[in-house]
Image (spheres, coloured by chain):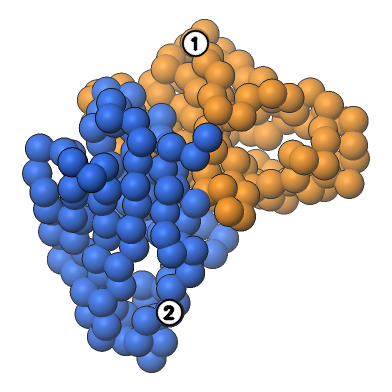
Amino acid sequence: DAEITQSPRHKITETGRQVTLACHQTWNHNNMFWYRQDLGHGLRLIHYSYGVQDTNKGEVSDGYSVSRSNTEDLPLTLESAASSQTSVYFCASSERQIGAEAFFGQGTRLTVV
Amino acid sequence: QQQVKQSPQSLIVQKGGISIINCAYENTAFDYFPWYQQFPGKGPALLIAIRPDVSEKKEGRFTISFNKSAKQFSLHIMDSQPGDSATYFCAASKYNQGGKLIFGQGTELSVKP
């Protein structure tokens, strides 16, 4: 079955370190998204991509970057981790067609100490 | 700014009762309004969605009511069951933007047996 996989599921890192969260989908979806989930804020969009070599900033993009070198993967990099980036991160993907449903991964819980 | 406001933050309902969650949006350009359901440790999953050309959509025990003039929409869960206990998120987007969603803050629903 097609799926979307995030790794690692849990990570603890130190302030100032660079961290990369992986997202891999096997649906061959063109659209991919990264959200962070924080209590009281719901899910907020960090970055998104509508295809290979395409990346766009979302609502809360400061301190994060993404790259899209193939259809299946959209890694999220925290350039210099900060305590404010402690959160649960979700990757999602959808087809290109209008009204397509977004499918979410299981999430990565990141703690910055 | 919070473009989609959701209430209540938490809700306790007895088995067999009706659960009602409300959302309000600001951007009149939004034309796609999905509801996502999230169980602990899992990613959100699409539950039901509506477009503003209809005032109501029903799927089984779940109904979305939509009021375009008031810029409000709500989720009604009829005959609520303990298995419905989860966090519910409303969201809004433009229909041609795939999974680029603006989420509400979330409602934690607990259905007591």
Mark 1 falls within which chain? Answer: A
Label pair 1/2, CB-CB below 8 angstroms:
no
Q: Between residues B40 and B14, which one lies in front from this camera angle?
A: B14
In the rendered image, residues at marks 1 and 2 fall on the same chain? no
Three-letter residue code for mark 2: Ile
Residue B12 is marked as 2
Chain B, which colour?
Answer: blue
* Residue A111 x %, y %: 79, 48
Q: Amino acid at mark 1?
A: Asp
| Residue drawn at (11%, 49%) of the image | B55
Residue behind mark 1: A54
Task: Rate crowding at label 1 as few (under 14), some (14 to 19) or many (20 or more) other CA atoms within 10 Å.
Answer: few
Q: Is residue A37 left or right of residue A33?
A: right
Give coordinates of residue B98: x percent, y percent. 33, 28
Secondary structure under the numbered disc 1 in the rendered image: strand
Quarter-of-image position of residue A3: top left
